[in-house]
Image: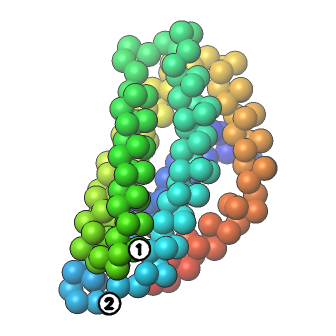
Amino acid sequence: MAKNYIQILNKEHENILSVADVIEKECNGIKSGKELDKDFFNKAVDFIENYTDKFHHSKEEDILFKELCKPEAEMHCNPVDQMLYEHDIGRNFVKGIKEGIKKGDKEKIVENALGYVQLIREHIFKEDNILYPMSESALNKESKDSIQNRFEKVLKSMEEENKKYSKIIGDFKKR
């Protein structure tokens, strides 16, 4: 049976959280004296920028959030602006990681990477436990069907990227 759009997003969240766990572990190792592995952090940034942001966040921002902001979405309060703000904070943490890699600044990398990990965990908790359940009750069947169809098109168009990042997730879990 095909997954609905919320199940798709939840599965992607599981992947993102598993990478966040590995990033945290790597940062704690560095804080304990381990050498900086620039290759690891470059791969982590690639994952965040492409899987988390372009693959996952784009479905939220370009599809789900836009449906939730339509007048026919019956929401007593709309947390979309907060979710978008947190996406931007995450992008700023990634920018800090990249600057730290470029300068070889372990402290900057660790600070921004751990900031990102904390943010993404809290953000995903809010989406999984507040926003997505709200969307289930706020959206009508027509909106949900539209979201589902558009998600399936995105998934099909990004099949190769999804395979690439699934491999990276697997490699990270082995660390």
| Residue 106: percent from left, percent from top | 29, 77
- Residue drawn at the location 27% of the way across and 69% of the way down: 108
The kind of secondary structure element at disc 1 is helix
The kind of secondary structure element at disc 2 is loop
Q: Against 14, is 106 above or below? A: below
Task: State which quadrant residue 158 falls in.
Answer: bottom right
What is the three-letter code of the residue carrying label 2? Glu
- Label 1, residues with CA under 10 Å away: few <14, some 14-19, many ≥20: few
| Residue 79: percent from left, percent from top | 38, 27
N-terminal-most mark, 1 or 2: 2
The single residue placed furthest to the top in the displayed view is: 71
* In-front residue for pair 88/2: 88
What is the three-letter code of the residue carrying label 1? Lys
- Residue drawn at the location 76% of the way across and 57% of the way down: 159
Image-based side of 123 in relation to 174, left or right: left
Q: Look at the image and tell me whether residue 21 can be seen.
A: no
- Residue drawn at the location 67% of the way across and 30% of the way down: 147
- Label 2, residues with CA under 10 Å away: few <14, some 14-19, many ≥20: few
Image-based side of 22 in relation to 46, left or right: left
Number of marks in the rendered image: 2
Label at residue 102 = 1
- Residue drawn at the location 41% of the way across and 59% of the way down: 94
The single residue placed furthest to the front in the displayed view is: 103
* In-front residue for pair 145/112: 112
| Residue 121: percent from left, percent from top | 35, 53
Q: Look at the image and tell me whether residue 81 can be seen.
A: yes
Q: Which residue is mark 2?
A: 35
* In-front residue for pair 56/104: 104
Q: CA gap, disc 1 to disc 2?
A: 16 Å
| Residue 13: percent from left, percent from top | 49, 53
| Callout in the foreground (1, 2) | 1
Q: Quadrant of the C terminus?
A: bottom left
